[in-house]
Amino acid sequence: MSGRLTSATFWLLWMAVTLSACSGAVTPTSPASLTAAPPTWTPTHIPSPRPLLNPTPSPTPPPIPDPTLIPAPEPAPFSPRPSAPPMRVDAEGPATIPTIAPLPPGQGRSPVRLIIPALGMDVRVQPMGWHATSDAQGVRTEWDVPDSAAGRHIDSAFPGELGNVVISGHNNIGDAVFAPLSSVGERDMPLKLGDPMILEDELGRRFVYRVTGWRRFPEARASVAERNENASYLL
């Protein structure tokens, strides 16, 4: 089973600090200003100033506090730096999963419902085709993933048959039915190896698959060669 998952984007915040330097200019003194000035007349008797009638007393300066008596400020509460986002990893379990004999050819039917109890998922499934598109990288095909349901690739196996049942769904647009699956491989992910994933077909039969591993393939801004390599995993 395959979900169309996008890779995480980390934002880096750069803070630039501009420092401005203060500079002062020294004005040079001309040599002419250093010559002796001519003598000036100085009186021999300088009258003393008259006393003020109502002198204003000088204010008493406040006492200088004793630094040993000043209480120390309360330390700021410790706040640890936020931890980095958990890395997404691939997984493959060594557990042996019991299997049953596949359905005989021609007895498989289209799935109509996908249930993943560990994620609380219960979504509709419908057949899904594709269309051709072209851009600067060339011509390629793209799957027509439903907006409000999961889609079974029409060239993959039916539930219970021999082969791979491939189901895709959006995780960040439309109804985002695969949003819970977008955290596959993250720390504290509720889906574990060995958990059941149940497919119900149009006859009401339920087929229980169990998780034995997961892989993440980047599709956003991937080249045609990378997309072909990703798609080869489904084979």
Image (spheres, helix red, strand yellow):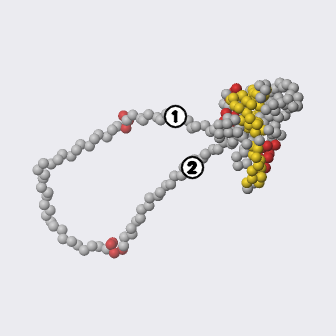
Which residue is pictured at 57% across the width and 49% down the height? 14
The residue type indicated by label 1 comes to Phe
> Mark 2, mark 1: which one is toward the viewer?
2
**At which x and y percent is residue 25?**
41, 64
Q: How far is disc 2 from disc 1 in space, using C-alphas?
A: 24 Å
Give the crowd class for mark 2: few <14, some 14-19, many >=20 residues within 10 Å: few
**At which x and y percent is residue 218?**
72, 44
Which residue is pictured at 84% across the width and 25% down the height? 99
Q: Residue 154 or 181: which is nearer the viewer?
A: 154
Residue 233 numbered mark, or none:
none
**At which x and y percent is residue 62?**
28, 41
Residue 116 position by quadrant: top right
Compared across the picture, whether 185 is left or right of 47 comes to right
Compared across the picture, whether 45 is left or right of 232 comes to left
Q: Earlier in the sequence, mark 2 or mark 1?
A: 2
Residue 173 position by quadrant: top right
Which residue is pictured at 37% across the width and 38% down the height? 67
Q: Quadrant of the C terminus?
A: top right
Which residue is pictured at 17% across the width and 47% down the height? 56
**Residue designated by label 1:** 78
The residue type indicated by label 2 comes to Trp
**Residue designated by label 2:** 14
Q: Residue 148 or 187: which is nearer the viewer?
A: 148
Label 2 element class: loop
